[in-house]
Image (spheres, helix red, strand yellow):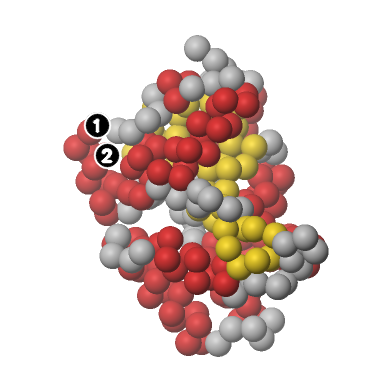
Amino acid sequence: MGQRVALFDLDRTLIRRESASLYVAYQRAIGEATVVDQLRMGFWVAQYTLGVIDAEAVAKKAFETVRGKSEVGMIARCDDWVRNYVAPHLTDSARRTVADHRSAGDLVAIVTGATTYTAWPIARLLGIPHVLATELALDSSGCFTGQAVDPICYGTGKVTRVEQLGAREGFGFEDCVFYTDSYTDLPLLEKVAERVVVNPDVRLKREAQRRGWRVETW
């Protein structure tokens, strides 16, 4: 066996809310989004939670909106947004659990469908050295192409990303504990040695109860 590994989902796990909703709130505050945009995002989040939306298709539409924009600008923008809008939603339980794993010498990683521009600022706040997240493709001038790098870090894409990290760092799924709230993470949950279901959506709560997985409220 390799070293013990702790994998953390981001939305509704490390933070209480969905990062996409918090981003629209930020856009509204700086005049880039309307009440309608905010309501639309709330509708999408509700559909996602109920499992009745093609999340990958919605994500790809969102990636199109940044086509031609500078990565440097996005990094600065997201640092400001995360500090003011996302960090306040980090839970004490998340901070404590991450700190416990780090103190134990475990390898710690965020595994999220959000982009790297959302995940890395949170990782730095928590002292997490590894981020597996959706990566946006860049052109030769450092601007976004409007597409993501395959695979998107969602569903089976999370399994692939963890396999790749394991190949680099020398661990397997049998070394991993995974913390998540979402039924869409079932492919990875079924691979790892230990599952901790945190603030679960309705479908994952039902699945966790059926399989006897640990459920926690953060």
- Give the residue pinned by disc 1: 212
- In what element is the residue under mark 2? helix
Question: Which residue is located at x 50 percent, y 82 percent?
Answer: 37
Question: Which residue is located at x 65 percent, y 66 percent?
Answer: 145
Up the image or down, 5 lies above or below 150; here it is above
Residue type (three-letter) at the residue carrying disc 1: Gly
Marks 1 & 2, CB-CB < 8 Å contact: yes
Please state which of residues 57 and 175 is positioned toward the viewer in this rendering.
57
- Give the residue pinned by disc 2: 208
Does 206 sit left or right of 113 as displayed? Answer: left
Question: Which residue is located at x 70 percent, y 60 percent?
Answer: 138
Disc 2 crowd, CA 10 A, few/some/many (<14, 14-19, 20+): some
Residue type (three-letter) at the residue carrying disc 2: Ala
- In what element is the residue under mark 1? loop
In terms of image quadrants, where is residue 166? top right
Please state which of residues 9 and 138 is positioned toward the viewer in this rendering.
138
Is residue 183 visible in the rendered structure shown here? Answer: yes
